[in-house]
Amino acid sequence: MNPETIPTRRFFLKAGAVLAAPMNGPALAAIGGDARVAEHEDQAAIRIVHQDWLRDINGGRAVAQTQVGETVRRIAEDHEGDADMIAVASDGRSASARFACAVEIETALSRETTLEQMAHAQGEGFVRRTERRAVAADYVKTRYGWTIARVEFATA
Amino acid sequence: MSGTPYPKEPMYRYAFTRLSPVQILAKLGPAAHGGPSSISPISDALAGKTIRIVTDKGPTLAYKFAGLNRLSVAENGKTFQASYGALTLDSVVLFAHLIPGTQRGYAVVIDRATNLATVVELWFSGYQDNREVQREIWQGHVEQAGKDAPTARHAATNRIEGKGFYWKQDAGPETLEFYPSAAYSHFVELSRQGGEFGYCAPSDYIRISDELYLYTRTECEFSGTFTLYVMDLNRIEQIGLRLGFDPHDALEYYLFRGTGEWLGQIAQFEKFGDIAGNPVPRPSPEKGSRRVYRPLQTMPKMTKAEVDAAVARNTRVFVNRTTAGNGAAGMATNGAAPSDKLVGKAMTLRYDDGPALDYKFVDAETLNWRFAGTGAWTNARYRAWETAPDAFIFGHVLEGTPNHDGHMVVVDFDQGLATCFNGTVNTPYFANEAAAKTWFGVIEAEGIVPPRRRRHHFTDDLVGTAITWNYAPGLTSMHLYSTPNTVSWIIFTESGAGGMEWSGPGAFVKIRDGLYFAYWLEDACNGTLGTITINLRTMHDAGIGYHCGTEGLSMSQIGAHARLAGRFDITKYYQPKTKRDEA
């Protein structure tokens, strides 16, 4: 292997960028050992869990709420936000992550005023807004793979 | 005495008879056998013809027309004999018939140019109030031998939204009809009821062609009467059907031909390219289902004792609403910040046909008031907004008054004038429903010499005007000031289409050029008195709501950003008229 390519791979790993394909095991072993290989595989697996969760939310198969109980209707990745961060614990059994997203939040209107009551009567008693948020999630590794333990919509 | 056209009660107060199905069937009997009446000559366009109408998801109707008024119809295989009537307008034929022995009938619109058909199935006793006509609209075509079925269809549309017409039917009824929504409409009965108030009804708008449209309305929450017509936008002509029971429970079942006048076009707020109709989704797939605003059903109806107890328990004056988690503040998220410029002022507001009140403004939220000349001051919470330079709106509750008065006042220091909308509860209808009186008067204060005769005054400047009000994210309505005594409000759907609509009595006072003080009463609705100052230069209002419910009495801020949606030219219809003028 050409030693001059090593700094390039180290840059990719430090920046946390998404790799299009898994790195070659022997190549990784050459720069960080088996632990780094496992970490990277865990990160990739967590990223898949995150993507599946986004699809479930956007497809209405899963429900999410903000900390104040507002319904999250859609989540899109925010490519203008901070880079994704996935940190796997040294024991490889838990992880935390932070993904920059655009979150569409739905808030129910009250029924106190006539206009709000009319909005409910016509089946639209809610307000939607989109905010840039950081999806902060904790994961645990089970025998079936990585699963989401907790999700929070933090300030971006 | 020649009499007046005004009803004793507005339509939403009238106790329409709860007719039974048996009563309705008995009243329909003669009309089912005789067909709809018509002042205009019935058309022979269908006489001797046989047609088969196939609808997409509804009935297949095979008609044989024998002469001008008899037909047989096979409806999904079962045949009925009935009487019918027909009218034509350009390429369109409208015919209608009941099915004898039932509470059902049809109104059918055929465009002979395209062979497309809209079938409107009608029936009574489909709702808890049996007299309310139910309808389902089916799209289809008239079969043509040897030809494939057309793929095009008449379709629900928003292309009528924003228009307004004066209509006069051949039988005499005159109306102003506005279509400020794609799901509701607003109508003023000029001849039947004197044109004092406007009313709202769920409506359908179907496109037949670029100039021919089908419109329906059902007077839900009133008589339940159904009106349908095909209108030609260019010629301003109509052919239509009316079916229902009037306030005396007499059957109205007639075809009509009408002519009209153009009142104008106001703005639409859907995205460009959106011409879809039916913006308010039906609540279920059940035939006839539609979303109808029925506010009286959910309005608490309280006794005087209950009102007094609720007010004693909880009176909230300008308390910030903080519903957890939603970030919305009801009707005032876009409201202006309150003003403290009244602090330190002392004045007497002397109303011509009302009391005189002394005021001392202690701080930005506290004033002292007393009836002028009496000894004791009462401490009250208030808020004020400077709605134009040296013109303020402020409000406070008069604790201890028997009808829990709330005063919403505009003081104009430039002119030395004051106008009060005196809000009270304990109306003759529901104790928690608000009423309003307008008092014109003057400011007596140091440095102000008020005019002796000049006052703020009622105005027709805003009649016909439509203004949108954006109160908070996702909460936008449009006001339509359809008569000098009516405020109608339309709530927009998420797509920007006009949705549900309601209306109530109102009044409009001119404060200055471009500055108005208006109120509306949510009669038989939420019971609220809403008051706003409308500044047509800043396009912002500052207002105060007064409301009593089981939760107590409240006075709260109203504030919204405005957009001018347009104006209908209608003031000429509200000029005083005598029978001699109409002869």
Image (cartoon, coloured by chain):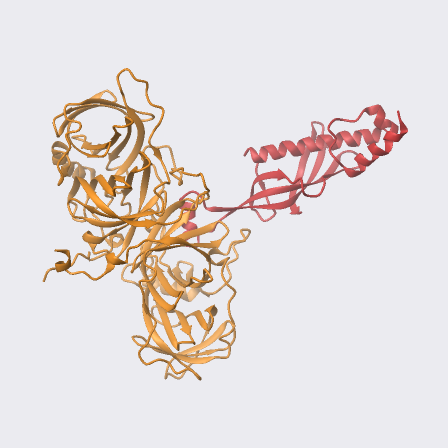
Position of A120 with respect to B117 (left or right) is: right
Q: Which chain is orange?
A: B
Q: A39 or B194: nearer the eye?
A: B194
Q: A72 or B34: nearer the eye?
A: B34
Q: A31 or B382: nearer the eye?
A: A31
Q: Which chain is red?
A: A
Count of numbered marks: 0
Position of B527 with respect to B74 (left or right) is: right
Q: B116 or A126: nearer the eye?
A: B116
Please give the name of the residue rendered at 40% of the width and 46% of the height, measured from the top-left corner: B268
In percent of width and height, residue B200 lies at 31, 49
Is A3 rendered above or below residue B428? above
Is B224 rendered above or below residue B440? above
In percent of width and height, residue B558 lies at 45, 61
Q: Which quadrant would residue B415 be assigned to in this image?
A: bottom left
Q: Is residue A32 visible?
A: no
Q: Is residue B409 visible?
A: yes
User: Which residue lies most toward the top here?
Assistant: B146
Please give the name of the residue rendered at 48% of the width and 65% of the height, measured from the top-left corner: B318
Q: Which quadrant would residue B95 be assigned to in this image?
A: top left
User: Which residue lies most toward the front here?
Assistant: B234
In percent of width and height, residue B572 lies at 25, 58
